Image (cartoon, coloured by chain):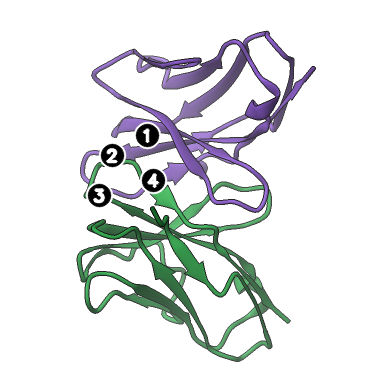
Amino acid sequence: GAGVSQSPRYKVTKRGQDVALRCDPISGHVSLYWYRQALGQGPEFLTYFNYEAQQDKSGLPNDRFSAERPEGSISTLTIQRTEQRDSAMYRCASSLDSYNEQFFGPGTRLTVL
Amino acid sequence: DQQVKQNSPSLSVQEGRISILNCDYTNSMFDYFLWYKKYPAEGPTFLISISSIKDKNEDGRFTVFLNKSAKHLSLHIVPSQPGDSAVYFCAASADNTDKLIFGTGTRLQVFP
């Protein structure tokens, strides 16, 4: 069975550009989570969805970051006007529903030049 | 402010011996704890969890112990195998939220 997939796996962009990172959760998983992981650190929560509803976006660093999951399946994390400090691994996870273990995707490595 | 702390960045253990990975937390609202294992170039994979109503959960070679009064949990791997070499993350969540708070990870190396 397919796990969580993310695309692109690597993204290099210039400062000031917008980027969109995609997450395709495990089929049937209700909950979808976005995390950011800096080198040598654990994943840091950004936001999560139950179905298409964004339940918690308290971890989004600022208003340049947004996420959507319009049909309750695929999700997109968008970063507008990227800055060098946005460079990190962005990880997506999904779970069957709330309070279940989360399954992580391979991540998207974002580098902002 | 790091709510979940893994104070040992690395651990080296001989094959066949016990590996003990430690994790401390500061938020008394945490009631669910998980361990994730991560190989290079892969996402973290769930290993084992424990609810705050328990003090021990065992799954094969892996056992997690929870000491709520000390706000401390540990993962025991016995016997350790070379394939266990990975980075291990401790994570916690509170009942009123689904988000996981992760520690910084401990790199375990099991040598022959």
Identify the residue shown where x is 52% and y is 26%: B23
Q: Colour of chain A?
A: green
Q: Which of the chains bears the disc numbered 4?
A: B
Q: Amino acid at mark 1?
A: Asn
Under mark 3, the amino acid is: Leu
In this rendering, which labeled residue sits more in front, label 3 or label 4? 3
Q: Residues within 10 Å of mark 1 (few under 14, many from 20)?
A: some
Give the letter of the chain under mark 3: A
Q: Which mark is residue B94?
A: 2
N-terminal-most mark, 4 or 2: 2
Which chain is depicted purple?
B
Residue under label 4: B100
- Disc 1 and disc 2 in contact, CB within 8 angstroms: yes
Q: Nearer the viewer, mark 1 or mark 2?
A: 2
Distance from the alpha carbon under mark 1 to that under mark 4: 12 Å
Q: Earlier in the sequence, mark 1 or mark 4?
A: 1
In which quarter of the view is residue A107 placed?
A: bottom right
Q: Are the residues under badges 2 and 3 in a single subunit?
A: no
Could you give the CA–CA distance between mark 1 and mark 2, rounded to whole angstroms?
9 Å
Q: Which residue is mark 1?
A: B27
Q: Nearer the viewer, mark 1 or mark 3?
A: 3
Q: Is residue A32 left or right of residue A65?
A: left
Mark sitting on residue A96:
3
Label 3 CA crowd tier, 10 Å (few <14, some 14–19, many 20+):
some
Placement of A53 over or under B52, stated as above or below: below
For the point 46% across and 82% down, the residue is: A64
On screen, residue A31 above or below A62: above
